[in-house]
């Protein structure tokens, strides 16, 4: 470990002391299995599966269903997501894309931008149930009803609201109160439930029970689907019975990259794994290992911030649904393109001086047509605002899973206890040339990037984060904290974060970035917006580090989100 | 069995002590309200935020239920105090709220300070309504809580936000009434009474 460890130990002590949210067990060490999620009850659900003889996929699916109940603001049956799976014995990785998809008649809803963001007009076809049941069918070992037990229990019997959820209910009270069914869940006598109050979601428990009995079909066909289509239509949204019946999660290859000898296995397009790989390719041209940490060096932070800004510009220009658009994935993730982008960065000052003026690069000369298309569907006929969780079992099988409703509490619309997404907000509408332009039946791009990092075939890190567009910056910073700065998993997670992109006017950062560094950044042309301490704004990384020497699993739940890592 | 009985006795003692302590606190707070200087509040009322949390919207709803002649301006400026007889400020930091407003914490603090200064110079009394409990305490919220508390003539607070006596201490030091209620829904009645 570097000298920087002392600095961060102090930083961690200070941060821990001034946190306003209650802190659950944020780190853990074990030999047999490890889970890190954004809520202790979801972590316990996963551990329950591992202790029952289930594998990492059983545990991840149980935790994913459970987190939708106990962290209902961030994900759930009405949303979507993606998961990277690594099966150690086979040495194979898979990606399941179950992000929400626009309705075949979505344009009829007349979605017209942010004023409709948290209304029924913003709802797309949810993919969570399809994705989780697909993962379970392909790789699970326990019964689906067993895997759903904890989620059903938490929904039916209720649980105590924690500090994070209490704050989010207050922050989003207008959205919640706009829909009677949603208000009935999160309010009592017309006012929001508070920390320590018990929240019971009986209707959601009943819906989960139907899925436990009937599987995917129980949600996408029959009475549940009919009532969801009807109720969403009554509120001005458009989903069809065919949307539900025909929704299929995509079982694909993940996206692969390398970074300083590590293998990066991450989310495929239109999710944002390619942004992580591109950023790491750019940074590989710089000796971060022998450089000061970014929180102590304006020069280093500037370089990483500009890398992020360039990557976001490329994302805006080139990332869309590869089923309907030509996404130059292989060019964007090529080492040569990374080197070209590195040399385009002015290392001394912000250039161009307005964040929004950054231009995309040209990855097309680097596209290699002979590479295997990264989004190819595997032929397996007959088999079928966000949270992240990481799981590993004793055999070394890993799952990195990120799922979302879009914004916190999604569209704010609840039917059958299911809070629906607002994935329409992720499309482009005004820019007619955008690769992410809305189209019926299309999948929007998304910032999620669940990631597994391997070292010579052995799992090294399982990571990911919520946080809207910040996800990309957050995961980049966590990965370099682990690989370049050799921090332990707790330090890497707590280290101060920053974020900048092509559509913002500020460089956002946490106050753990030294004052002197901030002054120098301003001298370099940056305009700063500082968050005191650590803040949920910068995501909630739930990650597991596998020590190559002692082979133990080290879990870390992000203090920014009040999660819990549990091992056994 | 013996151990079980002993545990029950200890538990009962703890519960009794807890209840006694709670009653003592309520009595003290009631006494604090009684002996402090009564302030008359008049309408029209301006409701504003300090920290841009959505709590202000709940207070707007409460004021409406109490049929107060109140206008709500999240980012009120000194000029908005024209004709106003009482200023209700709802403190509580929200990064989401600040983001939506497109301002920094420092911008917000400056705005609130200017509003408070203007209210004081025009002798418009300020009522603090802290309804967010723990979610609006410590962290970045307490700077706003302290600023408004130290300039308020009356405070209505949901108990969870005062578990460490943060507002009790301010009320004692400033000799102003503090009313503590258990739930957000219970803050409306004491607010309404201030204007009767």
Image (spheres, coloured by chain):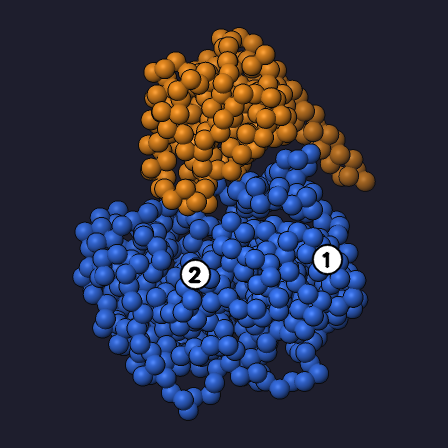
The vertical placement of B188 against A243, above or below, is above
Q: How far, Cα to Cα, is label 2 from label 1?
A: 30 Å
Do badges 2 and 1 share one subunit? yes
State the residue at coordinates (21%, 54%).
A525
**Location of mark 2 (residue):** A430
**Which percent across, then down, holds residue B161?**
54, 31
Q: Which residue is mark 1?
A: A230
Check disc 1 and report its element: helix, strand or loop.
Answer: helix
Judging depth in this view, the residue of A200 and B59 nearest the camera is: B59
**In the rendered image of this protein, which colour is used for chain A?**
blue
Question: The chain drawn orange is chain what?
Answer: B
Task: For mark 2, give the secondary structure.
Answer: loop
Is residue A327 among what the camera can see? Answer: yes
Mark 2, chain letter?
Answer: A
Q: Is residue A301 visible?
A: no
Q: How many marks?
A: 2
CA neighbours of label 1 inside 10 A, class few (<14), some (14 to 19), many (20+): some
The quadrant holding residue B103 is: top left
Q: Residue at x 66, y 43 (%)?
A: A183
Q: In the displayed structure, does residue A169 sit left or right of residue B6?
A: left
**In this rendering, which labeled residue sits more in front, label 2 or label 1?**
2
Chain identity of mark 1: A
In the rendered image of this protein, does residue B5 appear above or below residue A314? above
Residue A286's spot in the image, x, y percent? 26, 71
Q: Position of residue A83 (x, y in %)?
A: 56, 70
Q: Earlier in the sequence, mark 2 or mark 1?
A: 1
Note whether B191 is above or below A382 in the view shown.
above
């Amino acid at each position: 470990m570097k000298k920087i460890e002392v600095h961060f130990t102090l930083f961690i002590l200070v941060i821990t002391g001034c946190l306003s949210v209650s802190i659950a067990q944020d780190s853990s060490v074990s030999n047999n299995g490890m889970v890190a999620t954004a809520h202790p009850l979801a972590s316990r659900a996963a551990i329950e599966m591992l202790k029952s003889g289930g594998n990492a996929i059983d545990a991840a699916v149980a935790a994913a269903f459970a987190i939708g109940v106990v962290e209902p603001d961030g994900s759930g049956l009405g949303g979507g997501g993606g998961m990277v799976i690594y099966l150690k014995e086979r040495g194979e990785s898979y990606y399941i894309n179950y992000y929400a998809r626009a309705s075949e008649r979505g344009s009829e809803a007349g979605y017209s931008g942010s004023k409709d963001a948290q209304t029924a007009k913003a709802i797309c076809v949810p993919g969570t149930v399809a994705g989780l049941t697909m993962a379970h069918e392909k790789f699970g070992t326990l019964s689906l009803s067993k895997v759903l037990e904890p989620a059903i229990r938490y929904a039916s019997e209720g649980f105590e609201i924690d500090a994070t959820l209490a704050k989010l209910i207050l922050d989003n009270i207008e959205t919640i109160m706009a829909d009677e069914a949603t208000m009935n869940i999160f309010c009592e006598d017309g006012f929001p439930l508070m920390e320590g109050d018990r929240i019971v979601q009986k209707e959601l428990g009943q819906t989960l029970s139907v899925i436990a009995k009937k599987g995917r079909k129980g949600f996408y066909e029959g009475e549940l689907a009919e009532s969801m289509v009807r109720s969403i239509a009554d509120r001005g949204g458009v989903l069809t019975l065919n949307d539900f019946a025909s929704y299929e999660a995509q079982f694909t290859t993940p996206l692969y990259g390398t970074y300083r000898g590590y293998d990066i296995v991450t989310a495929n397009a239109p999710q944002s794994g390619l942004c992580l790989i591109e950023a790491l390719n750019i940074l590989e041209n710089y000796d971060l290992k022998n450089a000061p940490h970014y929180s102590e060096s304006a020069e280093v932070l500037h370089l990483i911030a500009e890398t992020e800004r360039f990557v976001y510009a490329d994302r805006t220009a080139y990332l869309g649904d590869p089923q309907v658009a030509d996404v130059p994935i292989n060019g964007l993730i090529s080492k040569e393109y990374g080197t070209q982008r590195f040399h385009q960065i002015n290392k001394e000052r912000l250039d161009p001086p307005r964040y929004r003026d950054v231009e995309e690069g040209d990855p097309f000369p680097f596209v290699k047509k002979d590479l295997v298309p990264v989004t190819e569907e595997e032929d397996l006929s007959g088999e079928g605002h966000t949270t992240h969780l990481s799981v590993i079992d004793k055999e070394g099988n890993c799952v990195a899973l990120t799922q979302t409703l879009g914004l916190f509490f999604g569209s704010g619309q609840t039917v059958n206890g299911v809070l629906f997404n607002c994935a329409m907000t992720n499309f482009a509408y005004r820019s007619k040339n955008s690769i992410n332009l809305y189209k019926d039946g299309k999948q929007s791009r998304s910032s999620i990037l669940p990631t597994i990092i391997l070292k010579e075939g052995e799992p090294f890190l399982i990571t990911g984060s919520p946080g809207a567009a910040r996800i990309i910056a957050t995961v980049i910073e966590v990965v370099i904290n682990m690989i370049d700065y050799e921090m332990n998993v707790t330090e890497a997670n707590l280290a101060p974060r920053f974020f900048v992109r092509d559509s913002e006017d500020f460089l956002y950062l946490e106050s753990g970035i030294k004052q002197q560094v901030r002054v120098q950044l301003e001298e370099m042309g940056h305009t700063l917006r500082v968050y005191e301490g650590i803040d949920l704004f910068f995501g909630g990384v739930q990650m597991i580090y596998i020590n190559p020497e002692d082979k133990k699993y080290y879990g870390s739940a992000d203090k920014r989100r009040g999660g819990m890592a549990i091992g056994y | 069995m013996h151990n079980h009985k002993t545990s029950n006795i200890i538990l009962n003692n703890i519960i009794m002590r807890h209840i006694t302590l709670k009653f003592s606190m309520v009595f003290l707070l009631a006494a604090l309200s009684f002996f402090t200087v009564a302030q008359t509040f008049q309408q029209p009322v301006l409701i504003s935020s300090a920290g841009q949390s959505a709590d202000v919207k709940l207070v707007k709803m409460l004021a409406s239920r109490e049929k107060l002649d109140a206008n709500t301006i999240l980012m009120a400026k000194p000029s908005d105090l024209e004709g106003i007889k009482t200023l209700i400020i709802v403190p509580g930091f929200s990064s989401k709220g600040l983001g939506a407003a497109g301002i920094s914490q420092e911008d917000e603090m400056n705005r609130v300070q200017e509003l408070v200064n203007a209210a004081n110079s025009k002798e418009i009394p300020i009522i603090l309504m802290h309804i967010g409990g723990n979610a609006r305490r410590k962290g970045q919220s307490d700077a706003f809580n302290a600023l408004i508390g130290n300039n308020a003539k009356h405070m209505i607070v949901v108990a969870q936000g005062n578990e460490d006596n943060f507002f009790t201490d301010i009320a004692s030091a400033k000799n102003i009434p503090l009313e503590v209620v258990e739930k957000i829904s219970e803050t409306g009645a004491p607010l309404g009474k201030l204007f009767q």
